[in-house]
């Protein structure tokens, strides 16, 4: 009979080749999953910070009565007179918006949060000289992606619309 | 004792079914791993694109900042009863310390005290550089803020006026 099946040696070699191939494929698959998770988490982290900074910028642009606090800034929203406090909590490494989390530390861990206010001049004349002409918010932190942490710096500056007028009224 | 024999057609089929050869298995593994490699490259590129989009978001914020810096400078000029565009040349670099430097090309931004600044060159460099163009016509000026990074650029434009309160 010509057909006599496989020898032990043939079987061993074929299993060995199969295992080597399988380990390469499994390795690639794990790498694929890892990269995909990093990409997903990075997208979430960046999106979180972007939304938070855009919200801060938009609100500050149309707010009044700015004042710096120990760890942040407070202001009054012009449309509904709401008092807003934006602060950094070094314990949780989160940025808070009226005590609720604005930048979620599990996505983006803020290590440094600074607010610089420029242009508070002596209060004389027709204009509101004491209000800030420029507010700069800068933050440095780490985008958390489970297996890879990516350090980032963000910065926004706002010249509030109402920074030069004497009016401190709101509610229109 | 009588030996039990397989019916002839069944025995023939068993002899014909010889399974895949090592070469066949090897080739299928190569094809499969190549397809998977394509996916790995795809996800890797997605990660690269995300990193570029991160830089683009930062560049957008910096470009918007450039415009707000000019507005702040205009407001300070007005409040101090000076010419509304005093100290602002046609092409310049400006940072959040309101340091103004006339320039023809974008000035690099450095990190100092977590701030993006032109004026402090001993801080860590960033891939970003910024230039402001001012096109003045009577009481109106067009401000263009250009931020360059890694061979790409973000450009924002707005109009500011010499307002009289």
Image (tube, coloured by chain):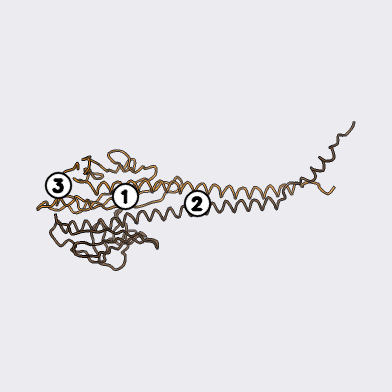
Residue at the extreme top: B1
> Which mark's residue is nearer the viewer, 2 or 1?
2
Task: Please name whichever residue, B24 or A4, is drawn nearer the observer in this view of the structure.
Answer: B24
Residues at marks 2 and 3 touching, judged by CB atoms closer than 8 Å = no
Q: Provide the residue designation for mark 3.
A: A167
Horizontally, residue B37 falls left or right of residue B114, namely right
Helix, strand or loop status at disc 3: loop
Image quadrant of residue B7? Answer: top right
Q: Provide the residue designation for mark 1.
A: A139
Residues at marks 2 and 1 touching, judged by CB atoms closer than 8 Å = no
Name the chain letter of the residue that bears numbered label 2: B
Helix, strand or loop status at disc 2: helix
> Which mark's residue is nearer the viewer, 1 or 3?
3
Of the chain colours in the picture, the one used for chain B is brown
Task: Please name whichever residue, A34 or A48, is drawn nearer the observer in this view of the structure.
Answer: A48
Report how far apart the C-alphas of labels 1 and 3 lie in the structure: 31 Å
């Amino acid at each position: 009979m010509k057909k006599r099946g496989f020898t032990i040696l043939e079987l061993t070699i074929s299993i060995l080749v199969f295992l080597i191939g399988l380990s390469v494929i499994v390795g690639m698959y794990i790498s694929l999953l890892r990269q995909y998770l990093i990409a997903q988490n990075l997208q979430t982290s960046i999106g979180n910070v972007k939304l938070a900074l855009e919200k801060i910028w938009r609100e500050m642009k149309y707010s009044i009565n700015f004042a710096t606090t120990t760890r942040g800034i407070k202001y009054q929203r012009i449309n509904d007179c709401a008092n807003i406090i934006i602060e950094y909590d070094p314990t949780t490494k989160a940025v808070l918006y009226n005590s609720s989390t604005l930048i979620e530390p599990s996505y983006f861990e803020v290590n440094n949060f600074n607010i610089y206010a420029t242009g508070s001049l002596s209060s004389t004349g027709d204009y509101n000289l004491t209000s800030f002409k420029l507010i700069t918010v800068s933050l440095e932190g780490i985008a958390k992606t489970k297996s890879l942490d990516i350090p980032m710096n963000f910065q926004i500056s706002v010249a509030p619309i109402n920074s030069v007028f004497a009016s401190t009224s709101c509610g229109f | 004792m009588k030996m039990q024999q397989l019916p002839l057609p069944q025995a023939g089929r068993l002899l014909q079914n010889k399974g895949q050869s090592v070469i066949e298995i090897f080739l299928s593994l190569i094809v499969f791993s190549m397809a998977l490699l394509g996916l790995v490259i795809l996800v890797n590129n997605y990660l690269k694109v995300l990193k570029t989009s991160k830089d683009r978001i930062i560049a957008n914020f910096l470009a918007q900042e450039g415009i707000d810096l000019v507005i702040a400078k205009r407001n300070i000029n007005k409040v101090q009863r000076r010419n509304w565009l005093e100290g602002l040349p046609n092409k310049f670099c400006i940072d959040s310390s309101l340091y103004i430097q006339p320039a023809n090309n974008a000035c690099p931004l450095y990190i100092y005290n977590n701030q993006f600044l032109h004026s402090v060159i001993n801080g860590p460099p960033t891939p970003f550089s910024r230039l402001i163009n001012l096109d003045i016509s009577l009481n109106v000026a067009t401000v263009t803020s250009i931020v360059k990074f890694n061979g790409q650029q973000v450009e924002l434009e707005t109009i500011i006026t010499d307002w009289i309160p």
